[in-house]
Amino acid sequence: MAKITVNPITRISGFLEIEVTVENNRIIDAKSSGMLFRGFEKMLKGRPPLDAVYFTERICGICSTAHSLAATLALEYALDIEPNENARMIRDFVHGCEFLQNHIRHFYQYTLPDYIKGPNIHPLINNYSVDLRLPPDRNDKLVQHYLESTKYSRLAHEMLAELAGKAPHNHGIFIGGVTVKMDADKWIKVRSILDSILSFVKDVMLEDVYTIARYYPDYFLNGSGYGNLLSYGLYNTYKDREAFYVNPGIFKNGTISSFDENMITENIKYAWYEADQIENKPTDEVEIEADRYKEKAYSWVKAPRYNDVPFEVGPLARMWISGIYNNGISTMDRTIARVLEVIKIAEIMQELLKRVELKPSGQRKYSVPDQAEGKGLIDTTRGGLGHWIDIKNQKINHYEIITPTSWNLSPRDTKLQRGPVEEALFCAEIKDIENPVEIGRIVRSFDPCVSCATH
Amino acid sequence: MNSCPIAISKDFIAKNLIKLSLQNTHKINLIWLELAGCSGNIISLLNADNPDINYFLTNMISLKYNNSLMAAEGEKAYRQFLETLDTEFILVIEGAVSTKAQGLYDVVAKYNGQYVTGMEAAKLAGERAKHILAVGTCAAYGGISAAAPNPSESVSVSAFLKRDIINVPGCPVHPDWIIGTIAHLLVFGVPELDQKNRPVIFYSINIHDACPRRSFFDQRVFAEKLGEPFCMFKLGCRGPVTNTDCPIRRWNDTDNWPIGDNTPCIGCAREGFPDLMEPFIRY
Amino acid sequence: MNIHNNNFSCQLSHITYRLSYYTKVFFSTPNPWEKMYYVNLISNELFWLNSLTQQLWEYFTEPNNTIEEKQFTLTELAKYTGANGTPAYAAVNGIVYDVSLEETWGGGSHFGLIAGKDLTNQFKSCHQAEAILNNLPVVGVLI
């Protein structure tokens, strides 16, 4: 029996430690620990509610747009505002840009170095890794694409900035829709960039992921986890099929059923927090205090549960629930689903652009009520993101954030159920204990973002 | 080879000039250390163009440690950090230094069974680095990581290390500011700094003074809500108290920037962001 | 016309600036056509200057126009927060200043402070010199 600790898990956003116990080359126990805590929910208390949009996006540098959108939705709910259809489409387009940026960077810069010998540039090259199976010519081709891809992920952020001011941490997404006035100049610019990204993804990225899948078929067999999938829904306000993606839903025990947000709870039994209640609903106003020295706790990530069960979120969950992808649930399936999703999202963005009209933003003056409650639940790059806001005396009284990676990287709960990543690692084979490459490959297939998960 | 720089397209002139001046210099090592923050500055660096990230890594510096990009993981990754300490290197820190619970609110690695906190890593590298750049508002001033009530007791890099530091604030930092500052260090030495240790080339311009909407302010034409093409002073614009070259440089290779997107500047590159810059929007 | 308004002194300083500039160009150019052009511009400015003086004269010859200080209670002052189109007023040492167009007071807020209050203590804790207050238009006194 041997204990292996990998800390830092590099090529993710934030700080993550994975500790596994290995017996006879099999993982018999796994723990995932988020290692960074800043305390956003505490900071938000007492601030002006409208500031939540620009404040919460700074939780995460790689998926800031997701937080600005969830905060906006929560505020729109609280202030009872409905954005006009045109503004909503532009906003959804902006959100799409973040998907393209994230998925391309995650696949090339974060995932690929697990499977290939990277570019001959320090520290991108992997001098240590074993189990690199690609023949040199194929490897070189993928290295070439690694370097080429930086252009396209950059371009995705260029589109985002064209419509929303800047990236990361955009300004353009705000309650009531967006602040940009779409004109022909912006329209054709984002249209042309989108076309170039889509052709790169279709011609290059898609082939690359299948190349990896061909040489690493055993990764279709590990990292399955619970197989419970959850989505809050994405691009589901559009009736026509071309612009529609996925409705909220859960997949458990082989069936898809409807999603009820009141079933979401957060458990802090094994997280570094103290509170009166161990299990809380997002709307509960419980004072949760950080306690880094709490006994038995091992992570800054809380454990979200749906109906007391851990669920996996992310591109695979969406592709699965929408019925587009159903090959399987595993390390490699997650990676393939992510690449396929880039195409799906880019095509939806093209459809949105066709429908967008050249109109002013439709912004109004908004007044904050004395008391209100709001919630914003939406699927973002890494899965379902929820913001819950409670306003009292025109200030934020309570703010709760449950991020996608909180779902995936959750620690154990009161019932000792492992989090989805822990479960995915459980039983996986480690061929060489000195070089446990499998751990990183399985964990990265979830695209962890610890800055978000702990916030 | 005929390599007249003018014949080559305009886009590449800047690149070639840097190349010309860099070709005889030895590539210096660089550690990009992420601490308590959102990792947004490394993402912003990846958004750089001319020079882009590939050029930056191949021709300007030799990146030795960055947990977002490096292939190695776990102890092997951290060993590269330790090995670099004995060489001549530039240290780039993004994120604030969180000091609560002996730094355990931000653990960057585990080495020989011991946690390495962000505090320790910053101290280790900070004492030996040739130059230190505090990149992003969290590193430069504490920023959002140190927002009240500052649950992680985060402080800026200069408050923690107490030595000469170049501050390159911004939330996130503009890729041109960081690459430009490093290029200056490599080719021309330490750039001219202002009282807050920011490179004058990027931070000497007051946003309000250089704002394309300044004439609306002078004529008292104010926007009453977001989305209007006028001066956003009455909505709480922080341009008058913030110094960066955003109005001229713009963002992400577009001609857009927050004010161009009809929203007020929120002073993200200023000391005191976010607490002193709020409310961001006030009707 | 309100002579407390910044606008008046602003207009006056613009006219003086332009006059001195046009005169400079007039003397430095050898081209007679250009000289004529600038003479024209100068006479235009003189016309505006004249009309401003006229307005000022009318203002002071009105019997009811004495410079009267408005008195504010704290509750009254609290109405002027700069929100929803109201002016932004702040009191220091018993004097109420209009900070609506003060550049560091975007949206009626100033480094975490909101207008419509007596900010004497906050002022003293941050600013050493009281001279900066002289640049602000006075709107009244706090009682």
Image (cartoon, rainbow, N blue to C red):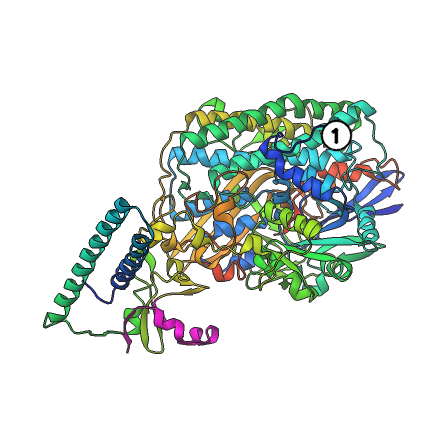
Q: Residues within 10 Å of mark 1 (few under 14, many from 20)?
A: many
Residue C11 sits inside the magenta stretch:
no
Estimate the x, y position of residue B271 in percent, counting from the top left.
54, 61
Say left or right for A231 vs A28.
left
Give me the residue at 54% from left, 59% from top.
A43
Q: Helix, strand, or loop for circle 1?
A: helix
Give me the residue at 84% from left, 52% from top.
B83
- Residue B101: which quarter of the image? bottom right
Does residue C113 lie above or below C28 as drawn?
below
Estimate the x, y position of residue A326 in percent, counting from the top left.
65, 24
| Quadrant location of the C terminus of chain B in the rendered image | bottom left
The residue under label 1 is A143
Please state the extent of the stretch shown in magenta in the rendering: C116-143
Residue placed most toward the observer, A100 or A260: A100
Q: Is residue B249 visible?
A: yes
| Quadrant location of the N terminus of chain B in the rendered image | top right
Residue C135 sits inside the magenta stretch:
yes
Say left or right for C50 vs B41.
left
Residue placed most toward the observer, C120 or A289: C120
Estimate the x, y position of residue C128 in percent, counting from the top left.
46, 76
Q: Is residue A298 visible?
A: no
- The answer for which chain carries disc 1 is A
Number of numbered tags placed on the structure image: 1
Does residue C115 lie above or below A403 as drawn?
below
Residue placed most toward the observer, B96 or C37: C37
At label 1, the amino acid type is Val
Estimate the x, y position of residue A314 in percent, counting from the top left.
62, 36
Residue placed most toward the observer, B155 or A301: B155
